[in-house]
Image (cartoon, rainbow, N blue to C red):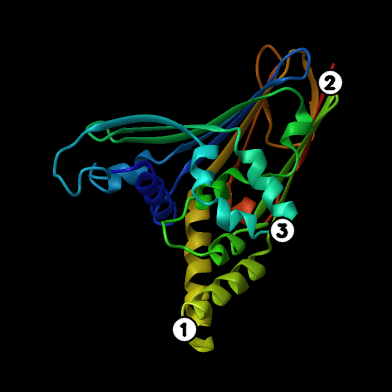
Amino acid sequence: MKIVKYLFAILVGFNLTSCVVSETVNFNADNSGKINYKFDMSKMMQMAGGKMGSESTGNKKDVDSTFTMASLYASKKDSIAKLSKEEQEKFKKMEKFTCRMVMKEEEGIFQYEMFSDFKNPSELQDMISPVNSLSDVVPNGKKASDLESMKNNGVTRYAFDGKKFSKQVTVKPKEQIKEDYKKDFEKEGSNSEEAEALANQMTQSLEMVMTESNYEMTVTFPKKIKKVSAANAKISEDKKSVTISYPMKDYMESKNLNFEIETE
């Protein structure tokens, strides 16, 4: 199965069962660093009976593939070019990410990572949400409207001046997401009543998935941490790392997503 098909399987799986999303940001002394997103969908693999990549052949096999977001966006450049300049910039910032997919069917492991180095925190401004970046890979034949429907679903902003770190996440309100679903279904030929019903079903399904999924972020600094604004923050023994966890439902409802960390 090709990489795009694997990624499409991720999209399907993300809408069918729970997922654990981990985000790590490691800063160096000069404020450069590395950002990493990891999606663990092993539970989805196990629920599928370990047949994610072998349904057509019946033979189980391992996959360990590395590629870039830039290579994936290249095939959609015409559609992306039809978006606003602001939206194009968000896609541009995701191009520097390298991706790795690991699938071990016998062991029930299915993981997907996105990672990138950065020279300074300003490179991380106004990024597409990592969850929504999975939707950037749509099957061949989709129109520009498919990309239009996903824009502004989530934007992440980071700031770090060497002493104070902050993260702000802006997500589209649930009612707006439902309205966007409705418009998409109407474009596909559904009448208003049918589109409304389908949109409600999609929104409810998404909320159920989010309730079963979790998001965890870990930030590491070269200096010790003095305080963190998040109530559920766990600081490491050496005081240089902090981990914050919350249910993905909070993400959908835009709750408890923003926080600040102050270092020495």
Q: Position of residue 148 (x, y in %)?
A: 61, 63
Picture quadrant where residue 182 is located: bottom right
Q: Can residue 155 be seen in this view?
A: no
Q: Quadrant of the N terminus?
A: top left
Label 1 to label 2: alpha-carbon separation: 53 Å
Q: Is residue 121 above or below residue 199?
A: above
Disc 1 and disc 2 in contact, CB within 8 angstroms: no
Residue located beneath label 2 in the image: 162
Which numbered marker is on residue 190? 1
Q: What element carries label 2?
A: loop
Left or right, residue 250 beside residue 58: right
Residue located beneath label 3 in the image: 84
Amino acid residing under circle 1: Ser
Disc 3 and disc 1 in contact, CB within 8 angstroms: no
Label 1 Cα crowd, 10 Å radius (few <14 / some 14-19 / many 20+): some
Residue in front for this viewpoint, 212 or 134 = 134
Amino acid residing under circle 3: Ser
